[in-house]
Image (cartoon, rainbow, N blue to C red):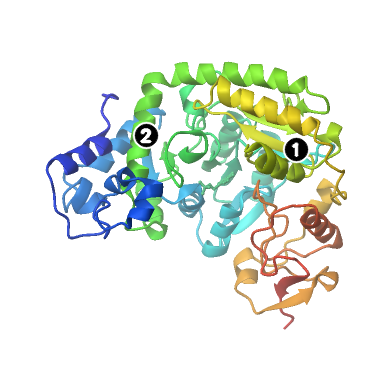
Amino acid sequence: MDHSKAPVLEALQDFRSRGYVPFTPPGHRQGRGVDPRVLDVLGEEVFRADVLALNGLDDRLMTNGVIEHAQELMADAVNAEQAFFSTCGSSLSVKSAMLSVAGPHEKLIVPRHAHKSVVSGLILSGVRPVWLSPRWDADLHMSHPPGPEEVRALFEAEPEAKGMLLVTPTDYGTCGDIAAIAEVCHSFGKPLIVDEAWGAHLPFHGGLPQWGMDAGADVVVTSVHKSGAAVEQSSVFHQQGDLVDPAVLKAREDLLGTTSPTSLVYATLDGWRRHMVEQGEHLITAALALAERTRAEISTLPGLEVMDFTHRTHSFDPLKMVIDLSGLHISGYQAADWLRAEQRVTVGLSDHRRIVAQFTHADDQRTADVLVEALRALTAAGLPSPKPVDLPSPDELQLEMAMLPRDAFFAEVEQVPAERAAGRVAAEMITPYPPGAPAVLPGEVITDAVLDYVRSGLATGMELPDPADSKLETVRVVARG
Ligand SMILES: Cc1ncc(COP(=O)(O)O)c(C=O)c1O
């Protein structure tokens, strides 16, 4: 295929050059109706690029196949049979993927460290999760993707499971053995969905962990806004093989997606694909070299260690720099806040002992130097040691599931004091964010250990976006009948 083409970008240029006068959304009319104070901040170009697909980028019946062609090019670029663009992040794409494999009350194997968008998918659909333990790294207090043996054992125990979802890479960049897991799934005739939200760059460089489509997964979801160069919310889901019908996948997306996707998402996805096909290998090679140099430099700073997961997990993404702060006796929450306030540096994930700085092809020596100097200043900042987070053991994080997530979420609920919540069935998610894997799910029996964890975390700076009582003095539980 001709990857020098960018059908969405070309259609947008065409729309402008032909001078169409739309009487359709968006009402801002490509910026004409926007308050100049908004334009001062955003610039007019953003609005000029925001055009409807239907009767805008393409005609009323989409006969030019603008989006279709862009999706075909994406599929070709990443070795998929089909690719679908989505404008609501992987949060929507994972739901579409799950619903294309299992329906209400059917079983789906899901690792317990899945992102909250997966849990939302379970709540909305009524799919029954069969929980798969991730590989807990007890001394580091983190989890990695499960291995093929665990998957095989679970399919043997739960033969009616319709398929499985795997999360890889994790937010820490640790990766599972997709090829081996796909083989196990396929030996049972079941499809493998990979939530590869953090892996949009993986198809474009041989030195990175193996990309899900190359490894034989049936559906792979990526967030191009995370590690690629498309705007926020840009996601693609990819399909191959005959275990998941692309028409079903498309219909599930149609159920959840917007009828008014912005061309900003489509155009930047299209441009990213062209850029990566033409220059990805070279750009990512440079990013990898930069990350390696920076990793070595950070590791010379007193009290800091850039974690190396070589012997802990199948593979990991070297562009994710997981910085362990244990030697400084401070938390990741403190470090992230201090770096933002004092150094104007923002990092992604922070937890009780780590921060994660993600490199992409857009970084260069200047940004790497800024990070190193900011971290050097952090090592000298003398931040006080925080109160400890009451970290549970892996066993304590595996709560008993008493009800389906959907049934608990939509049940009669009551708000009980946290001290009296143990033993009750949760009716809400409680999610340390990021990474966004819920510690408590609707339907699970709350324990003191998990409550101590999230409440002590909250006291030291953990972000919990979802409980109804954001201070967690009370917890939303299923009412007693
Ligand atoms: C593993 C995982 N899956 C899915 C998502 C949702 O992706 P998005 O933010 O693109 O909606 C995230 C977001 O952080 C994630 O970490």
At which x and y percent is residue 153? 70, 42
Q: Quadrant of the C terminus?
A: bottom right
Query: For residue 166, which numbered disc appears in the image?
Result: none
From the image, tell me which residue sits under label 1. Answer: 354
At which x and y percent is residue 216? 50, 31
* As drawn, 81 above or below 52: above
Q: In the image, is 342 to the left or to the right of 235?
A: right
Q: Nearer the viewer, residue 110 or 46?
A: 46
Type of amino acid at the residue the image marks with label 2? Glu
Location of residue 406 (image quadrant): bottom right
Q: Nearer the viewer, residue 171 or 424?
A: 171
Q: CA distance from mark 1 to mark 2?
A: 39 Å
Location of residue 357 (image quadrant): top right
* Label 1 crowd bin: few (<14), some (14–19), many (20+), radius 10 Å: many
Given this view, does label 1 or label 2 mark the residue nearer the observer?
A: 1
Q: In the image, is 340 to the left or to the right of 367?
A: right
Residue 173 seen in the current view: no
At which x and y percent is residue 196? 54, 38
From the image, tell me which residue sits under label 2. Answer: 81
Type of amino acid at the residue the image marks with label 1? Arg
Q: Are marks 1 and 2 in contact (CB under 8 Å)?
A: no
Q: Nearer the viewer, residue 157 or 388?
A: 388
Element assignment for label 1: strand
